[in-house]
Image (cartoon, grey):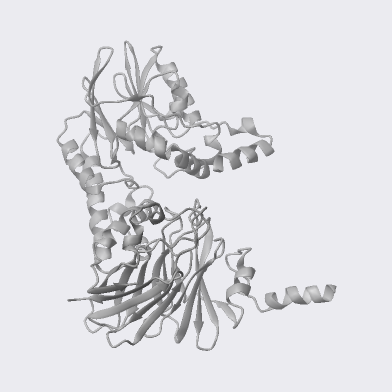
Amino acid sequence: MWRYLLALWLGGMGAVTAAAFDYALADRLSEVAPGVFVIRGDQAHFSAGNGGNILNTGFIVSSKGVLVIDTGPSAQYGEQMRALIGEITAQPITRVLNTHHHPDHYFGNQAFADVPIAATAASRAAMAQLSGDYADAMYRLVGPAMFGTEYLLPTETLQAGEISLGERRIDIKERAGHTRSELIIRDTDSGVLFVGDLVFNERAATTPDADIARWLQTLSELAQTPFSQLVPGHGPVDDSSRSIQQTAAYLQWLRSFLSEAAARGATAAEALYQPVPAPFDGMAVMPEEYQRSVHHLFPALEQLTFYPPLSLRRN
Amino acid sequence: MLLALLLLYALPSGALVEDPLASVQWRAMAQLYLSEGDIVFDERVKVLAPPQAENSLLVPVLVDATALRDVQEVLVFADFNPLPLVLRFFPERALPVIGFDIKVQQATPVRAAVRTLDGVWHVGHAQVDAAGGGCTVASVGSGLSSWSARLGEVSGALYRDPVPGALFQRLRFQIMHPMDTGLAPDVPVFHITEVEVRDTQGDLLGRIAPYEPVAENPVFSLEVPPAERVNVRGRDNNGNTFDAVLGIE
Protein backbone atom coordinates (compact mmCIF):
# COMPACT_ATOMS: atom_id res chain seq x y z
CA MET A 1 0.00 0.00 0.00
CA TRP A 2 2.83 2.40 0.85
CA ARG A 3 4.24 2.42 -2.64
CA TYR A 4 0.90 3.53 -4.06
CA LEU A 5 0.59 6.29 -1.47
CA LEU A 6 4.12 7.37 -2.26
CA ALA A 7 3.43 7.34 -6.00
CA LEU A 8 0.32 9.42 -5.40
CA TRP A 9 2.24 11.84 -3.24
CA LEU A 10 5.10 12.21 -5.69
CA GLY A 11 2.71 12.40 -8.61
CA GLY A 12 0.68 15.01 -6.80
CA MET A 13 3.77 17.09 -6.28
CA GLY A 14 4.68 16.79 -9.95
CA ALA A 15 8.02 15.61 -8.70
CA VAL A 16 8.46 12.22 -10.33
CA THR A 17 11.91 13.03 -11.69
CA ALA A 18 12.99 14.36 -8.29
CA ALA A 19 12.77 10.81 -6.96
CA ALA A 20 16.24 10.00 -8.35
CA PHE A 21 18.46 9.01 -5.44
CA ASP A 22 22.24 9.12 -5.77
CA TYR A 23 23.80 6.25 -3.81
CA ALA A 24 27.33 7.52 -4.59
CA LEU A 25 28.43 3.91 -4.97
CA ALA A 26 31.80 4.81 -6.55
CA ASP A 27 32.84 6.37 -3.23
CA ARG A 28 31.96 3.14 -1.46
CA LEU A 29 33.78 0.79 -3.81
CA SER A 30 36.94 -1.07 -2.85
CA GLU A 31 38.91 -3.84 -4.56
CA VAL A 32 39.66 -6.26 -1.74
CA ALA A 33 41.65 -8.63 -3.98
CA PRO A 34 42.47 -8.49 -7.71
CA GLY A 35 39.13 -8.55 -9.51
CA VAL A 36 37.11 -8.87 -6.29
CA PHE A 37 35.09 -5.77 -5.39
CA VAL A 38 32.94 -4.74 -2.43
CA ILE A 39 30.49 -1.82 -2.27
CA ARG A 40 30.07 -0.86 1.35
CA GLY A 41 26.78 0.30 2.90
CA ASP A 42 26.03 2.44 5.94
CA GLN A 43 26.03 0.97 9.45
CA ALA A 44 22.41 1.93 10.02
CA HIS A 45 18.79 0.87 9.84
CA PHE A 46 16.74 1.61 6.71
CA SER A 47 15.99 5.32 6.32
CA ALA A 48 15.03 7.84 3.68
CA GLY A 49 18.46 9.42 4.17
CA ASN A 50 20.45 6.30 3.28
CA GLY A 51 18.04 5.08 0.61
CA GLY A 52 18.10 1.65 2.22
CA ASN A 53 21.82 1.22 1.53
CA ILE A 54 22.81 -0.51 4.73
CA LEU A 55 24.47 -3.60 3.28
CA ASN A 56 27.56 -4.73 1.42
CA THR A 57 27.23 -5.96 -2.12
CA GLY A 58 30.03 -7.30 -4.28
CA PHE A 59 31.14 -8.50 -7.67
CA ILE A 60 33.88 -10.69 -9.04
CA VAL A 61 35.42 -9.96 -12.44
CA SER A 62 36.91 -12.67 -14.65
CA SER A 63 38.11 -12.70 -18.25
CA LYS A 64 34.78 -14.20 -19.26
CA GLY A 65 32.21 -12.28 -17.31
CA VAL A 66 31.19 -10.81 -13.98
CA LEU A 67 29.46 -12.49 -11.03
CA VAL A 68 27.28 -10.13 -8.95
CA ILE A 69 26.69 -10.90 -5.25
CA ASP A 70 23.46 -9.27 -4.01
CA THR A 71 21.81 -6.32 -5.71
CA GLY A 72 20.90 -3.84 -2.97
CA PRO A 73 17.66 -2.44 -1.58
CA SER A 74 16.08 -0.77 -4.63
CA ALA A 75 15.88 -0.66 -8.41
CA GLN A 76 17.89 2.55 -8.39
CA TYR A 77 20.64 0.90 -6.35
CA GLY A 78 20.73 -2.00 -8.81
CA GLU A 79 20.93 0.37 -11.78
CA GLN A 80 23.70 2.42 -10.20
CA MET A 81 25.57 -0.74 -9.22
CA ARG A 82 25.35 -2.04 -12.76
CA ALA A 83 26.59 1.29 -14.15
CA LEU A 84 29.53 1.23 -11.74
CA ILE A 85 30.46 -2.31 -12.78
CA GLY A 86 30.38 -1.07 -16.38
CA GLU A 87 32.97 1.57 -15.47
CA ILE A 88 35.28 -1.04 -13.93
CA THR A 89 35.12 -3.67 -16.65
CA ALA A 90 33.86 -4.23 -20.17
CA GLN A 91 33.03 -7.85 -19.29
CA PRO A 92 29.36 -8.75 -19.39
CA ILE A 93 27.51 -9.67 -16.22
CA THR A 94 26.93 -13.39 -16.54
CA ARG A 95 25.18 -14.21 -13.30
CA VAL A 96 23.66 -12.67 -10.19
CA LEU A 97 23.50 -14.44 -6.80
CA ASN A 98 21.16 -13.44 -3.96
CA THR A 99 22.69 -14.59 -0.67
CA HIS A 100 19.35 -14.88 1.18
CA HIS A 101 15.73 -13.75 1.16
CA HIS A 102 15.92 -10.36 2.91
CA PRO A 103 14.83 -7.43 0.73
CA ASP A 104 18.00 -5.30 0.92
CA HIS A 105 19.83 -8.17 -0.78
CA TYR A 106 17.57 -8.62 -3.79
CA PHE A 107 15.36 -5.59 -4.42
CA GLY A 108 17.91 -4.33 -6.96
CA ASN A 109 17.42 -7.47 -9.11
CA GLN A 110 15.30 -5.45 -11.52
CA ALA A 111 18.44 -3.85 -12.97
CA PHE A 112 19.70 -7.32 -13.93
CA ALA A 113 16.52 -8.62 -15.56
CA ASP A 114 18.46 -9.80 -18.67
CA VAL A 115 20.88 -11.89 -16.60
CA PRO A 116 20.28 -15.25 -14.86
CA ILE A 117 19.56 -14.53 -11.17
CA ALA A 118 20.13 -17.44 -8.80
CA ALA A 119 19.21 -18.21 -5.19
CA THR A 120 18.71 -21.41 -3.22
CA ALA A 121 15.36 -23.20 -3.38
CA ALA A 122 14.58 -22.19 0.22
CA SER A 123 15.42 -18.54 -0.43
CA ARG A 124 13.36 -18.51 -3.62
CA ALA A 125 10.36 -19.94 -1.75
CA ALA A 126 10.67 -17.34 1.02
CA MET A 127 11.02 -14.48 -1.49
CA ALA A 128 7.96 -15.67 -3.41
CA GLN A 129 5.95 -15.63 -0.20
CA LEU A 130 7.20 -12.43 1.42
CA SER A 131 8.19 -9.98 -1.32
CA GLY A 132 4.87 -8.11 -1.25
CA ASP A 133 5.11 -7.47 2.49
CA TYR A 134 8.77 -6.52 2.13
CA ALA A 135 7.91 -4.04 -0.61
CA ASP A 136 5.33 -2.36 1.64
CA ALA A 137 7.81 -2.20 4.50
CA MET A 138 10.65 -0.88 2.34
CA TYR A 139 8.51 1.84 0.76
CA ARG A 140 7.38 2.86 4.22
CA LEU A 141 10.85 2.94 5.79
CA VAL A 142 12.94 4.14 2.86
CA GLY A 143 10.47 6.23 0.87
CA PRO A 144 11.56 8.12 -2.26
CA ALA A 145 14.69 6.07 -3.05
CA MET A 146 12.40 3.07 -3.60
CA PHE A 147 10.65 4.84 -6.44
CA GLY A 148 10.23 2.54 -9.45
CA THR A 149 11.15 -0.60 -7.50
CA GLU A 150 9.09 -3.65 -8.41
CA TYR A 151 10.80 -6.66 -6.88
CA LEU A 152 12.12 -9.21 -9.35
CA LEU A 153 12.41 -12.79 -8.09
CA PRO A 154 15.42 -14.99 -8.94
CA THR A 155 15.11 -16.99 -12.14
CA GLU A 156 17.32 -19.97 -11.23
CA THR A 157 17.74 -22.36 -8.32
CA LEU A 158 21.30 -22.44 -7.06
CA GLN A 159 22.88 -25.69 -5.83
CA ALA A 160 25.84 -25.79 -3.49
CA GLY A 161 29.12 -26.73 -5.16
CA GLU A 162 31.70 -25.19 -7.43
CA ILE A 163 30.81 -22.85 -10.24
CA SER A 164 33.23 -21.56 -12.83
CA LEU A 165 33.54 -17.93 -13.78
CA GLY A 166 36.03 -17.78 -16.65
CA GLU A 167 39.40 -18.72 -15.13
CA ARG A 168 38.06 -18.39 -11.61
CA ARG A 169 36.55 -21.13 -9.45
CA ILE A 170 33.86 -20.07 -7.02
CA ASP A 171 32.88 -22.41 -4.20
CA ILE A 172 29.28 -22.13 -2.96
CA LYS A 173 27.98 -23.45 0.36
CA GLU A 174 24.47 -23.23 1.80
CA ARG A 175 24.09 -22.89 5.57
CA ALA A 176 21.33 -21.95 8.02
CA GLY A 177 21.29 -19.45 10.88
CA HIS A 178 20.43 -15.86 10.10
CA THR A 179 17.73 -17.32 7.84
CA ARG A 180 16.99 -20.92 6.83
CA SER A 181 19.26 -20.59 3.84
CA GLU A 182 22.35 -18.41 3.45
CA LEU A 183 25.09 -18.51 0.86
CA ILE A 184 28.78 -18.70 1.70
CA ILE A 185 30.66 -17.73 -1.46
CA ARG A 186 34.40 -18.30 -1.70
CA ASP A 187 36.58 -17.09 -4.53
CA THR A 188 39.13 -19.91 -4.39
CA ASP A 189 42.05 -18.03 -6.00
CA SER A 190 41.97 -14.94 -3.83
CA GLY A 191 40.50 -16.61 -0.76
CA VAL A 192 37.91 -13.84 -0.37
CA LEU A 193 34.88 -15.16 1.47
CA PHE A 194 31.45 -13.52 1.04
CA VAL A 195 29.36 -14.65 4.00
CA GLY A 196 26.23 -12.54 3.57
CA ASP A 197 24.33 -11.90 6.79
CA LEU A 198 25.89 -14.82 8.65
CA VAL A 199 28.35 -12.20 9.94
CA PHE A 200 27.76 -8.64 11.10
CA ASN A 201 30.86 -6.54 11.81
CA GLU A 202 30.60 -3.80 14.47
CA ARG A 203 26.84 -3.90 13.98
CA ALA A 204 24.15 -5.76 15.91
CA ALA A 205 22.95 -8.85 14.06
CA THR A 206 19.34 -8.95 12.84
CA THR A 207 17.14 -11.86 13.92
CA PRO A 208 13.65 -11.80 12.33
CA ASP A 209 14.18 -15.26 10.80
CA ALA A 210 17.05 -16.46 12.94
CA ASP A 211 17.67 -19.89 14.40
CA ILE A 212 20.30 -18.97 16.98
CA ALA A 213 21.51 -22.52 17.68
CA ARG A 214 22.06 -23.32 14.02
CA TRP A 215 23.57 -19.88 13.42
CA LEU A 216 26.18 -20.52 16.14
CA GLN A 217 27.00 -23.91 14.57
CA THR A 218 27.50 -22.24 11.21
CA LEU A 219 29.72 -19.59 12.79
CA SER A 220 31.98 -22.19 14.42
CA GLU A 221 32.31 -23.86 11.04
CA LEU A 222 33.11 -20.48 9.46
CA ALA A 223 35.80 -19.85 12.07
CA GLN A 224 37.56 -23.00 10.77
CA THR A 225 37.28 -21.90 7.13
CA PRO A 226 40.43 -20.38 5.65
CA PHE A 227 40.05 -16.99 3.96
CA SER A 228 42.10 -13.93 3.05
CA GLN A 229 39.32 -11.38 3.50
CA LEU A 230 35.86 -11.90 4.92
CA VAL A 231 33.06 -9.79 3.48
CA PRO A 232 30.17 -9.58 5.98
CA GLY A 233 26.66 -8.64 4.90
CA HIS A 234 26.88 -5.55 7.08
CA GLY A 235 29.98 -3.76 8.35
CA PRO A 236 33.64 -3.43 7.33
CA VAL A 237 35.54 -6.16 5.50
CA ASP A 238 37.56 -8.23 7.99
CA ASP A 239 40.98 -9.83 7.42
CA SER A 240 40.71 -11.82 10.65
CA SER A 241 38.03 -13.96 12.26
CA ARG A 242 37.24 -11.19 14.77
CA SER A 243 33.88 -10.36 13.17
CA ILE A 244 32.88 -14.04 13.31
CA GLN A 245 33.72 -14.21 17.04
CA GLN A 246 31.94 -10.92 17.62
CA THR A 247 28.74 -12.08 15.90
CA ALA A 248 28.82 -15.36 17.85
CA ALA A 249 29.44 -13.58 21.16
CA TYR A 250 26.54 -11.21 20.54
CA LEU A 251 24.12 -14.02 19.64
CA GLN A 252 25.15 -16.04 22.70
CA TRP A 253 24.71 -13.02 24.93
CA LEU A 254 21.34 -12.17 23.35
CA ARG A 255 20.00 -15.68 23.88
CA SER A 256 21.15 -15.99 27.48
CA PHE A 257 20.16 -12.42 28.42
CA LEU A 258 16.61 -12.92 27.16
CA SER A 259 16.37 -16.45 28.61
CA GLU A 260 17.36 -15.13 32.04
CA ALA A 261 14.82 -12.31 31.79
CA ALA A 262 12.09 -14.81 30.88
CA ALA A 263 13.14 -17.09 33.75
CA ARG A 264 12.68 -14.19 36.19
CA GLY A 265 9.14 -13.71 34.92
CA ALA A 266 9.95 -10.51 33.02
CA THR A 267 7.72 -9.58 30.09
CA ALA A 268 8.88 -8.62 26.60
CA ALA A 269 7.92 -5.00 27.34
CA GLU A 270 10.29 -5.01 30.33
CA ALA A 271 13.05 -6.79 28.39
CA LEU A 272 12.86 -4.08 25.69
CA TYR A 273 14.14 -1.49 28.14
CA GLN A 274 16.87 -3.51 29.80
CA PRO A 275 20.12 -1.65 29.12
CA VAL A 276 22.42 -3.42 26.66
CA PRO A 277 25.77 -3.98 28.42
CA ALA A 278 29.28 -3.39 27.03
CA PRO A 279 30.73 -4.31 24.64
CA PHE A 280 27.49 -4.84 22.74
CA ASP A 281 26.11 -1.36 23.48
CA GLY A 282 28.82 0.06 21.23
CA MET A 283 27.64 -1.78 18.13
CA ALA A 284 25.87 0.14 15.37
CA VAL A 285 22.04 0.28 15.40
CA MET A 286 21.83 -0.19 19.17
CA PRO A 287 19.54 -0.39 21.05
CA GLU A 288 17.03 -0.56 18.16
CA GLU A 289 18.30 -3.87 16.85
CA TYR A 290 18.27 -5.37 20.34
CA GLN A 291 14.65 -4.23 20.72
CA ARG A 292 13.72 -5.85 17.41
CA SER A 293 15.34 -9.06 18.61
CA VAL A 294 13.25 -9.00 21.79
CA HIS A 295 10.18 -9.14 19.53
CA HIS A 296 11.64 -11.99 17.49
CA LEU A 297 13.04 -14.19 20.25
CA PHE A 298 11.16 -13.51 23.49
CA PRO A 299 7.81 -15.19 22.69
CA ALA A 300 9.46 -18.61 22.28
CA LEU A 301 11.73 -18.11 25.30
CA GLU A 302 8.89 -17.15 27.65
CA GLN A 303 6.98 -20.26 26.54
CA LEU A 304 9.83 -22.37 27.95
CA THR A 305 9.10 -20.97 31.43
CA PHE A 306 5.39 -21.87 31.41
CA TYR A 307 4.14 -25.20 32.66
CA PRO A 308 0.81 -26.99 32.25
CA PRO A 309 -1.91 -26.45 34.85
CA LEU A 310 -2.33 -28.76 37.85
CA SER A 311 -5.95 -29.03 36.80
CA LEU A 312 -8.09 -27.63 34.01
CA ARG A 313 -11.82 -27.67 33.39
CA ARG A 314 -13.29 -26.33 30.17
CA ASN A 315 -16.88 -26.04 29.02
CA MET B 1 -28.67 27.42 18.53
CA LEU B 2 -25.13 28.63 18.01
CA LEU B 3 -24.76 29.11 21.75
CA ALA B 4 -26.04 25.60 22.40
CA LEU B 5 -23.51 24.14 19.97
CA LEU B 6 -20.74 26.13 21.56
CA LEU B 7 -21.77 24.92 25.00
CA LEU B 8 -21.92 21.34 23.85
CA TYR B 9 -18.48 21.69 22.37
CA ALA B 10 -17.05 23.54 25.30
CA LEU B 11 -18.37 21.36 28.10
CA PRO B 12 -16.19 18.31 27.69
CA SER B 13 -13.16 20.27 26.53
CA GLY B 14 -13.39 22.55 29.53
CA ALA B 15 -12.79 19.59 31.81
CA LEU B 16 -10.16 18.16 29.49
CA VAL B 17 -6.46 18.75 29.93
CA GLU B 18 -4.37 19.12 26.81
CA ASP B 19 -2.94 15.86 25.47
CA PRO B 20 0.87 15.84 25.59
CA LEU B 21 0.83 13.54 22.55
CA ALA B 22 -1.56 15.90 20.67
CA SER B 23 -3.60 12.96 19.37
CA VAL B 24 -6.70 14.07 17.42
CA GLN B 25 -8.51 11.12 18.99
CA TRP B 26 -7.83 12.15 22.57
CA ARG B 27 -11.07 14.10 23.06
CA ALA B 28 -13.18 11.23 21.71
CA MET B 29 -11.31 8.71 23.86
CA ALA B 30 -11.82 10.77 27.00
CA GLN B 31 -15.54 11.16 26.25
CA LEU B 32 -15.98 7.47 25.51
CA TYR B 33 -14.06 5.94 28.38
CA LEU B 34 -13.30 8.59 31.01
CA SER B 35 -16.53 10.57 31.11
CA GLU B 36 -16.88 10.38 34.88
CA GLY B 37 -14.19 11.84 37.08
CA ASP B 38 -11.37 14.32 36.59
CA ILE B 39 -8.50 13.47 34.27
CA VAL B 40 -4.84 14.18 34.89
CA PHE B 41 -1.82 13.12 32.89
CA ASP B 42 0.41 11.51 35.45
CA GLU B 43 3.99 10.30 34.94
CA ARG B 44 3.52 7.92 37.85
CA VAL B 45 1.51 5.73 35.46
CA LYS B 46 4.23 3.98 33.48
CA VAL B 47 3.37 2.38 30.14
CA LEU B 48 6.14 0.30 28.62
CA ALA B 49 5.71 -0.49 24.92
CA PRO B 50 8.07 -0.62 21.96
CA PRO B 51 8.67 2.63 20.04
CA GLN B 52 8.40 0.52 16.87
CA ALA B 53 6.03 -2.44 16.64
CA GLU B 54 8.00 -5.17 14.92
CA ASN B 55 4.85 -7.30 14.69
CA SER B 56 1.48 -5.52 14.56
CA LEU B 57 -0.21 -8.67 15.90
CA LEU B 58 1.92 -8.88 19.02
CA VAL B 59 2.88 -5.58 20.63
CA PRO B 60 4.05 -6.09 24.22
CA VAL B 61 2.71 -3.62 26.81
CA LEU B 62 3.31 -3.36 30.55
CA VAL B 63 1.40 -0.91 32.74
CA ASP B 64 2.84 -0.11 36.17
CA ALA B 65 0.84 2.16 38.49
CA THR B 66 2.48 1.05 41.74
CA ALA B 67 3.49 4.66 42.41
CA LEU B 68 -0.22 5.46 42.96
CA ARG B 69 -2.23 4.46 46.02
CA ASP B 70 -5.77 3.08 46.14
CA VAL B 71 -5.98 2.04 42.51
CA GLN B 72 -9.48 0.80 41.66
CA GLU B 73 -9.19 0.18 37.94
CA VAL B 74 -6.70 0.25 35.10
CA LEU B 75 -8.33 0.99 31.72
CA VAL B 76 -6.17 0.57 28.61
CA PHE B 77 -6.97 1.92 25.15
CA ALA B 78 -5.17 2.64 21.88
CA ASP B 79 -6.41 5.89 20.30
CA PHE B 80 -6.09 4.87 16.67
CA ASN B 81 -7.26 1.29 16.81
CA PRO B 82 -10.62 0.71 15.09
CA LEU B 83 -11.69 -0.80 18.41
CA PRO B 84 -9.71 1.29 20.87
CA LEU B 85 -10.64 -0.36 24.18
CA VAL B 86 -7.98 -2.97 25.05
CA LEU B 87 -8.85 -4.11 28.55
CA ARG B 88 -10.01 -3.19 32.03
CA PHE B 89 -8.04 -4.48 35.01
CA PHE B 90 -9.33 -4.45 38.58
CA PRO B 91 -6.28 -5.16 40.80
CA GLU B 92 -8.22 -6.15 43.97
CA ARG B 93 -5.40 -7.72 46.06
CA ALA B 94 -2.82 -7.68 43.26
CA LEU B 95 -0.50 -4.75 42.58
CA PRO B 96 -1.69 -2.28 39.91
CA VAL B 97 0.68 -3.86 37.39
CA ILE B 98 -0.42 -5.70 34.27
CA GLY B 99 1.44 -7.05 31.25
CA PHE B 100 -0.23 -8.19 28.00
CA ASP B 101 0.21 -8.00 24.22
CA ILE B 102 -2.02 -6.13 21.79
CA LYS B 103 -2.81 -5.89 18.09
CA VAL B 104 -2.46 -2.45 16.51
CA GLN B 105 -3.88 -1.21 13.25
CA GLN B 106 -1.51 1.75 12.77
CA ALA B 107 0.79 4.04 14.74
CA THR B 108 -1.04 4.96 17.94
CA PRO B 109 -0.70 6.11 21.51
CA VAL B 110 -1.29 3.27 23.98
CA ARG B 111 -2.82 4.74 27.13
CA ALA B 112 -3.46 3.47 30.61
CA ALA B 113 -6.06 5.43 32.59
CA VAL B 114 -5.79 4.52 36.26
CA ARG B 115 -8.76 5.34 38.48
CA THR B 116 -7.97 5.96 42.13
CA LEU B 117 -10.40 5.85 45.05
CA ASP B 118 -11.08 9.62 44.76
CA GLY B 119 -12.46 9.01 41.25
CA VAL B 120 -9.58 10.71 39.42
CA TRP B 121 -8.27 9.16 36.19
CA HIS B 122 -4.47 9.24 36.10
CA VAL B 123 -3.36 8.79 32.49
CA GLY B 124 -0.01 7.51 31.27
CA HIS B 125 0.95 6.50 27.75
CA ALA B 126 3.49 5.29 25.23
CA GLN B 127 3.59 6.08 21.52
CA VAL B 128 3.90 3.01 19.27
CA ASP B 129 4.79 3.32 15.60
CA ALA B 130 3.55 0.48 13.42
CA ALA B 131 3.23 -0.61 9.81
CA GLY B 132 -0.31 -1.62 10.69
CA GLY B 133 -2.93 -4.16 9.80
CA GLY B 134 -2.99 -5.98 13.12
CA CYS B 135 -6.73 -5.67 13.76
CA THR B 136 -8.21 -6.51 10.38
CA VAL B 137 -6.60 -9.87 9.73
CA ALA B 138 -7.93 -13.19 10.96
CA SER B 139 -6.12 -14.86 13.86
CA VAL B 140 -3.57 -17.52 12.98
CA GLY B 141 -5.64 -19.98 14.99
CA SER B 142 -8.84 -19.46 13.04
CA GLY B 143 -7.03 -20.69 9.93
CA LEU B 144 -6.02 -23.96 11.62
CA SER B 145 -8.31 -26.91 12.16
CA SER B 146 -6.73 -27.60 15.55
CA TRP B 147 -7.65 -24.36 17.30
CA SER B 148 -10.92 -25.56 18.82
CA ALA B 149 -9.22 -28.49 20.57
CA ARG B 150 -6.91 -26.11 22.38
CA LEU B 151 -9.49 -23.41 23.11
CA GLY B 152 -9.34 -22.37 26.75
CA GLU B 153 -6.15 -24.25 27.59
CA VAL B 154 -4.24 -22.46 30.31
CA SER B 155 -0.51 -22.64 31.09
CA GLY B 156 1.76 -20.37 33.07
CA ALA B 157 4.07 -19.90 36.00
CA LEU B 158 4.50 -18.30 39.40
CA TYR B 159 7.96 -16.74 39.57
CA ARG B 160 9.62 -16.73 42.94
CA ASP B 161 10.85 -13.30 43.81
CA PRO B 162 14.64 -13.18 44.24
CA VAL B 163 14.04 -11.18 47.46
CA PRO B 164 12.93 -13.54 50.27
CA GLY B 165 9.86 -12.32 52.09
CA ALA B 166 8.67 -10.17 49.18
CA LEU B 167 5.03 -9.17 49.43
CA PHE B 168 4.20 -9.96 45.82
CA GLN B 169 5.31 -12.38 43.16
CA ARG B 170 5.04 -12.34 39.40
CA LEU B 171 2.32 -14.52 37.90
CA ARG B 172 2.21 -15.07 34.15
CA PHE B 173 -0.34 -17.18 32.32
CA GLN B 174 -1.48 -17.86 28.78
CA ILE B 175 -4.98 -18.74 27.61
CA MET B 176 -5.35 -20.34 24.19
CA HIS B 177 -7.92 -18.27 22.32
CA PRO B 178 -8.13 -16.78 18.77
CA MET B 179 -9.22 -13.35 20.11
CA ASP B 180 -10.78 -12.50 16.74
CA THR B 181 -11.75 -8.84 16.43
CA GLY B 182 -14.67 -9.38 14.04
CA LEU B 183 -12.99 -6.98 11.59
CA ALA B 184 -11.49 -9.67 9.34
CA PRO B 185 -13.84 -10.82 6.54
CA ASP B 186 -16.05 -13.79 7.49
CA VAL B 187 -14.52 -14.20 10.96
CA PRO B 188 -16.98 -13.20 13.70
CA VAL B 189 -15.93 -11.41 16.86
CA PHE B 190 -14.73 -14.02 19.35
CA HIS B 191 -12.73 -13.05 22.41
CA ILE B 192 -12.26 -13.67 26.11
CA THR B 193 -14.44 -11.29 28.11
CA GLU B 194 -13.58 -12.18 31.68
CA VAL B 195 -10.56 -13.51 33.57
CA GLU B 196 -10.45 -13.92 37.34
CA VAL B 197 -7.42 -14.84 39.41
CA ARG B 198 -8.20 -16.29 42.83
CA ASP B 199 -6.17 -17.83 45.63
CA THR B 200 -6.84 -21.38 46.83
CA GLN B 201 -9.37 -20.07 49.39
CA GLY B 202 -11.36 -18.62 46.51
CA ASP B 203 -10.53 -14.99 47.34
CA LEU B 204 -10.29 -12.70 44.34
CA LEU B 205 -6.73 -11.45 43.67
CA GLY B 206 -7.45 -9.61 40.45
CA ARG B 207 -9.91 -9.41 37.60
CA ILE B 208 -9.37 -8.62 33.90
CA ALA B 209 -11.96 -7.75 31.24
CA PRO B 210 -10.13 -8.17 27.89
CA TYR B 211 -11.50 -6.73 24.63
CA GLU B 212 -10.83 -7.39 20.93
CA PRO B 213 -7.37 -5.78 20.57
CA VAL B 214 -5.72 -8.17 23.06
CA ALA B 215 -3.40 -10.48 21.10
CA GLU B 216 -4.23 -14.05 20.14
CA ASN B 217 -3.48 -16.72 22.79
CA PRO B 218 -3.02 -13.90 25.29
CA VAL B 219 -0.36 -13.91 27.98
CA PHE B 220 -1.18 -11.86 31.10
CA SER B 221 1.34 -10.87 33.76
CA LEU B 222 0.34 -9.79 37.27
CA GLU B 223 1.94 -9.21 40.68
CA VAL B 224 0.01 -11.26 43.24
CA PRO B 225 0.49 -12.05 46.96
CA PRO B 226 2.84 -15.05 47.38
CA ALA B 227 1.04 -18.38 47.02
CA GLU B 228 1.87 -21.92 46.05
CA ARG B 229 -1.11 -22.08 43.73
CA VAL B 230 -3.58 -19.79 42.01
CA ASN B 231 -6.86 -20.36 40.24
CA VAL B 232 -7.35 -18.76 36.81
CA ARG B 233 -10.88 -18.86 35.46
CA GLY B 234 -12.97 -17.02 32.91
CA ARG B 235 -15.16 -17.06 29.83
CA ASP B 236 -15.45 -15.75 26.30
CA ASN B 237 -18.26 -13.96 24.44
CA ASN B 238 -19.59 -17.32 23.19
CA GLY B 239 -19.97 -18.71 26.71
CA ASN B 240 -16.96 -21.02 26.63
CA THR B 241 -15.41 -21.25 30.09
CA PHE B 242 -12.03 -22.25 31.51
CA ASP B 243 -11.00 -22.94 35.09
CA ALA B 244 -7.39 -23.88 35.83
CA VAL B 245 -5.12 -24.26 38.83
CA LEU B 246 -1.54 -23.13 38.26
CA GLY B 247 1.30 -23.67 40.68
CA ILE B 248 3.72 -26.03 42.24
CA GLU B 249 2.75 -29.68 42.63
The residue nearer to you, when weighing A146 against A59, is A146
| Image location (x, y in percent) of residue B80 | 56, 61
Q: Residue furthest left?
A: A224
Quarter location, residue B225: bottom left
Question: Looking at the rendering, in which quadrant would you find the C terminus of chain B?
Answer: bottom left
Residue A285 position (above or below residue B37): above
Question: Looking at the rendering, in which quadrant would you find the N terminus of chain B?
Answer: bottom right
Quarter location, residue A178: top left
State whether residue B121 appears in this view: yes
What residue do we see at 36% from left, 37% from top? A126
Q: Residue furthest front?
A: A315
The residue nearer to you, when weighing A12 against A38, is A12
State whether residue A41 appears in this view: no
What residue do we see at 20% from left, 29% from top? A227
What residue do we see at 72% from left, 78% from top? B11
| Image location (x, y in percent) of residue A119 | 33, 29
The residue nearer to you, when weighing B227 against B202, is B202
